[in-house]
Image (spheres, coloured by chain):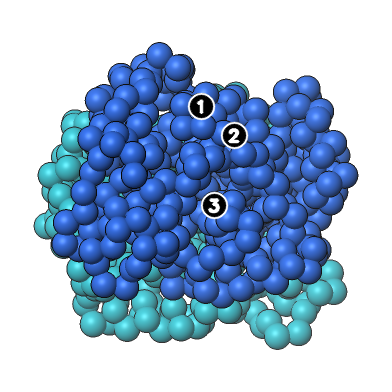
Chain colours: A cyan, B blue
Amino acid sequence: MAAVNRQIQLAELPKDKLGLEHFRLGEGAMPHAKDGELLLRVRYISLDAANRAWMQGATYRSALEAGQVMAGGALAEVVEAKAPGFASGDLVFADTGWQEYAVLPAKRVQKLEKREPLTHLLSVYGVAGLTAYFGLLNVGQPKAGETVVVSAAAGSVGSFVGQIAKIKGCRVVGIAGGAKKCAWLKSELGFDEAIDYKAVAVGGALKDAAPKGIDVYFDNVGGDILEACLFRMSNHGRIACCGAVSQYDGVAPRHGPRGIPGLIVTKRLTMKGFVVMDFDDERAKALSDLEGWVKAGKLKVPEDVMNGLENTPKALIGLLAGDNIGKRMVKVV
Amino acid sequence: MAAVNRQIQLAELPKDKLGLEHFRLGEGAMPHAKDGELLLRVRYISLDAANRAWMQGATYRSALEAGQVMAGGALAEVVEAKAPGFASGDLVFADTGWQEYAVLPAKRVQKLEKREPLTHLLSVYGVAGLTAYFGLLNVGQPKAGETVVVSAAAGSVGSFVGQIAKIKGCRVVGIAGGAKKCAWLKSELGFDEAIDYKAVAVGGALKDAAPKGIDVYFDNVGGDILEACLFRMSNHGRIACCGAVSQYDGVAPRHGPRGIPGLIVTKRLTMKGFVVMDFDDERAKALSDLEGWVKAGKLKVPEDVMNGLENTPKALIGLLAGDNIGKRMVKVV
């Protein structure tokens, strides 16, 4: 075992755009597990827009502070178990932070069944896949034949949302940045239409891509794209509010989208926020469905794996700029 | 029967604030019922913020146009019935417009059971009472012990919302304009707290009035008050979007409330729009509940009745300025 624990620390909190200067590579002492705790070796770090949101203030977790090891979820292996129910070699998902080793109380660690490839535990069988599954099906409640629109469609969650909506018989429109991603959504993932928000006005493009209106909008971005979709929703449409990646990396927006609450009332829309932890009871069913679709070749699993702990800040900054296609993660070891 | 039909016509559509100059008192020929139609004599005209919203564009009904008889719902009596199921003397609710007589197809008319006083058919047993009932109970789903906040609390809908929430065992906070209304909400209707939005900052006042956060917010107003409530919602809170009276009388707002979708996600809120027609199937149960509460003295029925068709424009303009306490209507005959 290593004598030191390499880690990425949050040097200072960003005031607007996140940059490499907000991080530093440091070393901590090797941590030791006490009773009830586990010593974990971090294998793959998950990169998520939420990493950036945590720097803005308290969300469903407390806000990050300068000087801390950067927080983040990871796939890790148990090295030493001082808690019942865990053994050396077990695979877990936990908020280890961006470091090689971490000690956590066993109750804050989620044991995972081994699956191959391991990376799928962070993508389709991890938070991304489950978020797509619950947000689309439980919150959005699409029916066959309805039109589903998803933003950040080439991202880790969006790429699953669109594919699951296709499996459920919906017309699927993805919104993504760049011609390459848009072509990929249609050719590789089977989306019916894709809108490049960097090239065209989304509102106008939606008139063509969703001519009967939008029944379910899965919102990963907030801001102007949410506003454009609001104006194209059908009566009794549902908006699953998953995140607001357009608003994480910079100063807080001064206003929300126009049309609220006016369009909510006249179209009888439902907007509903959710986080994946709210659906823990239904996790087994969801994993079983997802695995069935993957094995049947109906659900492709786009992954974007970078190498080396030291590249994690760059991986997050790139994610916020939309560089990734599919689930981005960093292989630590 | 009169030889002419006095009516209030929409002289021109308002560009911003509605004034008397947008209306004119005119005379039409007495209308005659054809097969399938009813000749109605208008008794009481209902004044609603929605009257103003219809001037802004298509909502759940088509937009109003200059030159038309001003649209509006009323309690009316059948004078001549040329449709099965109706007889002279029947009471109905219909969009008669602001005039003494109207002819409507029978299928666009809702027959009402007689109740005393007649005015209750436009208040507690009419759209106002049913909107409060369905919006609070079906959309808001309050549980005993939860905190319910309602805006435009001294208005036709809000005054019922707060009282029904008290009947259901909730802590009730009303938001209204002026010390007189606020005192009345507490002393006459039994609200726990009332916030005078003209005198204090609503966000700060909510910290004191709803110290555990808001579980259900019944929104009649939109705009800044909706924003203030959003920031004080509890996790898993519900916002019943009933209207946006703050935004009807003037130019359309340039932006929506801050915190959308960020707070919707992190607090897992639900915002849901509704209109009372969506709940027609449950109307009988609702009327039975409302009547039971009125007869038991648990639900007071504040009404604000003005006299004379010619005063209807003034009645609406005053309603938009918040002059009324309880359900405003104009007695025509």
Compare marks 3 and 1 and give the one earlier in the sequence.
3
Give the residue displayed 29% in from the left and 77% down from the top.
A294
Image quarter for residue A89?
A: bottom right
A136 relative to A255, above or below: below
Q: Nearer the viewer, residue A208 or A325?
A: A208
Mark 3 vs mark 2: which is more N-terminal? 3
| 3D distance between C-alphas at marks 3 and 2 | 13 Å
* Residue, disc 1: B311
Circle 2 residue:
B306
Label 2 crowd bin: few (<14), some (14–19), many (20+), radius 10 Å? some
Q: Is there CB contact under 8 Å for labels 2 and 1?
A: yes
Residue at the spot 68% in from the left edge and 63% down from the top edge: B142
The residue at which mark 3 appears reads as: B122
Find numbered disc 2 in the image and state the secondary structure of the residue it sits on.
Answer: strand
Residue at the (45%, 17%) spot, across then down:
B20
Q: Does the residue at mark 3 contact the one at mark 1 (Cβ under 8 Å)?
A: no
User: Taking the image as drawn, is residue B73 in sight?
Assistant: no
Residue B260 against residue B141 in the figure, above or below: above
Q: Is residue B45 left or right of residue B60?
A: right
Spatial separation of the CA atoms under disc 2 and disc 1: 8 Å
Pick the residue in front: A146 or A81: A146
Q: Is residue A96 above or below residue B320?
A: below
Percent position of residue A306, x then y: 39, 50
